[in-house]
Image (spheres, helix red, strand yellow):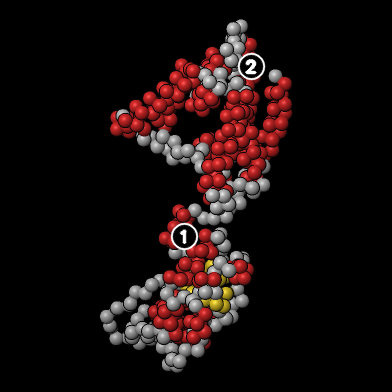
Amino acid sequence: MGPLVVYEVISQNTNLLLAFFIGIGFGFVLEANGFSSSRRLAGMFYGYDTTVLKVFFTAAIVGSVGLLFMSLFNWIDLSYIYINPTYLWSTLGGGVIMGAGFILGGYCPGTSFCAASIGKIDALAFIGGMFIGILVFAEGYPLWEGFYNAQFMGAPLLNEMLGASRGMLTLLIILVALGMFWIGEWAEKRFSRDDYKLNQ
Amino acid sequence: MKARLVLASVIIPLGLIIAAVPENTTKPYKLTAEQLLDEVKSGTQFIGPEEVADMVISKDPSLQLIDVRSAAEYEKFSLPNSINIPLVDILNSEWEGYINQDIKLNVFYSNGTNEANQAWMISRQLGYANNYVLQGGLNYWVETIMNPEAPENGSPNEEILKYNLRKGAGMALGSEASEAAQPVAAPGGAKPPVQKRETKKRVQGGC
């Protein structure tokens, strides 16, 4: 609720209350779509269920098209949108660790809480592991501080690196995403598993 | 399968539209802190007293002098045809039409440059253009335009020209000094006696 807080339309406390309800809504939608199932999430890696890919890329392309249209109509100033700064090596390292944990545990951090809230024991174990990881990272910070801050690139934008306009890049991503959806559904048939049930 | 077709038939046309239209390049409403700092560093907001005096004398209709001092100070002394918008009232909506416009050249002035600069910064942060600050403020104005210091004998011609210009401006604006302007040494005339060249470096005005 960025602009509403910045311009003091709503207070910090109201902001937190709104975040609470939005969080509940987000969790509800995740759970309703089977994202609390570790089999569905791990299926992305094995190819028998590519819902994760489809949902997140649909969100990305709808979001980017929506933002560009809102910018076109002068409803939003894109320069105010926060872009995560890129530290190349820690991004790559973090991606590998996160991906490995995703395959091993069958959850990502958000979905593990979602699954724990409907009573899944493996999700509780996953959350425990996550806290151990946080502890190890924080306590051992001096050891990986150099790696963590290496190769700082600011907030680079893909379209600027490619020299294309934002709209052109968005169109490209839309086409790539739809192509991946097609491959994903092909993979779902190719690697289908007879014993696969969403919640078992 | 079907959902994918529905998604594709909606999102591909939208993507084509957004790829075809030019990017929204409207300037953001507010400057970032870095942009403002850049403008302050390069001093683009300043306009020299000679330039302002010239516009005042020629009754340039595009000039709007704005006194940002208090009303009492404005009553005591003000530049010709200036209006008074005390700094504390600068955000008052009744003045907005004066500050947010693109026809006139607004020049803020105060005794020094502090208050005028503050007024300029506020107006700039609001995204308004055409607002400037009188370099050196009224103090420097009085020093250069109303009571210009006569250059020493044998000063370079441009110094004397500058002095004459200031002198003329001061007289046109009603300063008491009534000395005749110094004659410019005619080229090829008798050489003035050799003297120490000690031209006083002034703050660069926009002359």
Q: The N terminus of chain B lies in which quarter of the figure? A: top right
Above or below — where is B189 with respect to B42? below
Above or below — where is A190 with respect to A165? above
* Subunit of label 1: B
A151 vs B71, nearest the viewer: B71
B206 vs A144, nearest the viewer: A144
Q: Amino acid at mark 1?
A: Glu
- Residue A148 in percent (x, y) is at 36, 32
- Residue A179 in percent (x, y) is at 63, 22
- Tell me what residue is drawn at x 61 percent, y 47 percent: A76
- Residue B53 in percent (x, y) is at 51, 79
- Tell me what residue is drawn at x 44 percent, y 75 percent: B137
- Tell me what residue is drawn at x 42 percent, y 79 percent: B139
Q: Quadrant of residue B144?
A: bottom left
B160 vs A85, nearest the viewer: A85
A120 vs B34, nearest the viewer: A120
Query: Disc 2 designates what residue?
Result: A185
Query: Disc 1 designates what residue?
Result: B39
The answer, for residue B62, to whether it is visible in the render is: yes
The kind of secondary structure element at disc 2 is: helix
- Residue A103 in percent (x, y) is at 48, 17
For disc 2, the neighbor class at 10 Å (few under 14, some 14 to 19, many from 20) is some
Q: Nearer the viewer, mark 2 or mark 1?
A: 2
The kind of secondary structure element at disc 1 is: helix
